[in-house]
Image (cartoon, helix red, strand yellow):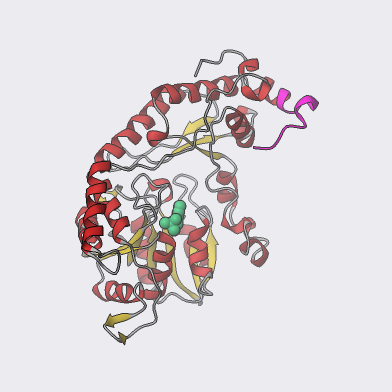
């Protein structure tokens, strides 16, 4: 990793890539390996591998305590957790969701023949815009699913008001927001229920995994039944259900990860502070900020590129970074409404989603967590600065015929 001074040093223009190995935006955290292996040995000795074992029960209690809710139901992943929460809450017809999210939010509805109605985001927060939500409500609307995008909380107060007076259910896809708070209250306790993802790509993981958290006793009971085929006891099925159970080995990973949670967050926060420092004052390149008076997990390092200022597009910057082996990602381009089956169902949805369309073209996620150290961040920021401060020259060279045959990032 050496400092690049001239455009010819950039890998896209023939220089050596800044990183020899491909650098992903994240690398799974595993916490204390010895503790994990102890737990795995323990569960093997016990021969209780799944079906609501002791580790799953302990994990659920730990999450409920941490989030400050009455119930936590551990699930095999967040997508199934969303599907179950949606069904248990009785959603049907149409449900209002942002398009600026991972596709699972929409699929969890469509999978059960519920129409996701894509709603635009607030240009300041990039989360569901409550004013737009009200405009999207029809007689078929039964609920709203907010997404705390990149861990930044939705306007939970306004959404709760709307849900209350329009008699709608309110769920949150909190896949990104484990460990975050809003006005001092932990995410997980808002709406009728919230859903976390503990996928390996999240800063806190259970290999695959997720959880539904809620303060609603009846909803929790239905979700518990539904994640276990509807079994209320031996030979007694009282509900339609599926198999959404978390395994013991996943819960063992989760319990071990929880012991290092503060450390994982501290690494993310340190990275965020360094990126902020190194990219400060860059014209047209803005790092997404977190409210540091709240609890944050800082797991996404999102850079927004304003092409009208930089003269270079987000996609061109991504292409340059990929040539350096920095695999920056365009989360969540192009928006759910531009992916199948939704783009065929609603070919003109984009007309009602101007802010979503704008943001989806401007943001990129940069490496963080233990994927990257301080030197790595310095190198990435050096490349970004070099490109943005020489944007006109970079653009001209990128658009020159010699580079026309290069592979797209
Ligand atoms: C916003 C959002 N919702 C849902 C999911 C699905 O989570 P899982 O992979 O645990 O099913 C993800 C996964 O990245 C996500 O980002």
* Numbered marks: total: 0
- Give the magenta part as a residue range: 397-409
Q: Is residue 191 visible?
A: no
Q: In which quarter of the image is ligand 1?
A: bottom left
Question: Which is more toward the observer, 326 or 121?
Answer: 326
Looking at the image, residue 172 sits to the left or right of residue 92; the answer is left
Instruction: Residue 133: give x, y in percent of width and height.
Output: 48, 62
Residue shown at the point (50%, 46%) measured from the top left: 123
Q: Does the magenta stretch include residue 406?
A: yes
Query: Residue 30 is drawn in which quadrant?
Result: top left
Q: Height in image: 315 above or below 15?
A: below
Q: Does the magenta stretch include residue 39?
A: no
Residue shown at the point (49%, 37%) measured from the top left: 24
Instruction: Residue 14: give x, y in percent of width and height.
Output: 67, 20
Residue shown at the point (32%, 67%) measured from the top left: 192
Q: Is residue 75 visible?
A: yes
Residue furthest top in the image? 5
Residue furthest right in the image? 401
Residue shown at the point (25%, 40%) measured from the top left: 262
């Amino acid at each position: 990793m050496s400092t690049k001074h001239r455009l010819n040093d950039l890998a896209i223009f023939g220089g050596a890539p800044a990183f020899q190995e491909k650098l992903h935006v994240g690398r799974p955290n595993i916490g204390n390996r010895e503790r994990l292996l102890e737990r795995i040995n323990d569960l093997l000795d016990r021969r209780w591998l799944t079906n609501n074992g002791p580790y799953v029960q302990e994990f659920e209690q730990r999450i409920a305590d941490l989030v400050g809710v009455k119930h936590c139901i551990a699930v095999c992943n967040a997508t199934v957790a969303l599907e179950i929460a949606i069904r248990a809450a009785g959603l049907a017809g149409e449900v209002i969701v942002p398009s600026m999210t991972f596709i699972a939010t929409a699929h969890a509805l469509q999978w059960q023949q519920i129409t996701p109605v894509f709603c635009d985001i607030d240009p300041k927060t990039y989360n569901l815009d409550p004013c737009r939500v009200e405009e999207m409500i029809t007689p078929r609307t039964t609920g709203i699913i907010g997404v705390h995008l990149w861990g930044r909380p939705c306007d939970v107060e306004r959404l709760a008001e709307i849900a209350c007076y329009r008699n709608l259910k309110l769920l949150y896809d909190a896949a990104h927001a484990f460990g975050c708070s809003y006005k001092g209250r932990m995410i997980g306790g808002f709406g009728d229920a919230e859903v976390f993802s503990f996928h390996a790509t999240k800063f806190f993981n259970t290999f695959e995994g997720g959880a539904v958290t809620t303060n609603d006793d009846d909803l929790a009971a239905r979700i518990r039944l539904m994640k276990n085929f509807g079994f209320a006891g031996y030979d007694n099925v009282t509900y339609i259900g599926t198999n959404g159970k978390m395994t013991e080995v996943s819960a063992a990973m989760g319990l071990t990860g929880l012991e290092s949670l503060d450390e994982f967050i501290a690494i993310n926060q340190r990275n965020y502070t360094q990126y902020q420092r190194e990219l400060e004052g860059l014209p047209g390149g803005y790092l997404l900020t977190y409210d540091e008076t709240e609890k944050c997990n800082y797991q996404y390092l999102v850079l927004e590129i304003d092409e009208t200022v930089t003269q270079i597009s987000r996609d061109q910057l991504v292409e340059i970074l990929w040539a350096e082996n920095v695999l920056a990602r365009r989360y969540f381009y192009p928006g759910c409404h531009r992916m199948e089956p939704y783009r065929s169902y609603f070919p003109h949805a984009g007309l009602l989603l101007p802010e979503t369309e704008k943001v989806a073209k401007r943001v990129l996620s940069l490496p963080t967590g233990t994927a990257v150290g301080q030197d790595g961040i310095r190198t990435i920021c050096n490349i970004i600065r070099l490109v943005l401060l020489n944007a006109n020259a970079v653009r001209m060279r990128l658009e020159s015929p010699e580079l026309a045959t290069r592979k797209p990032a």
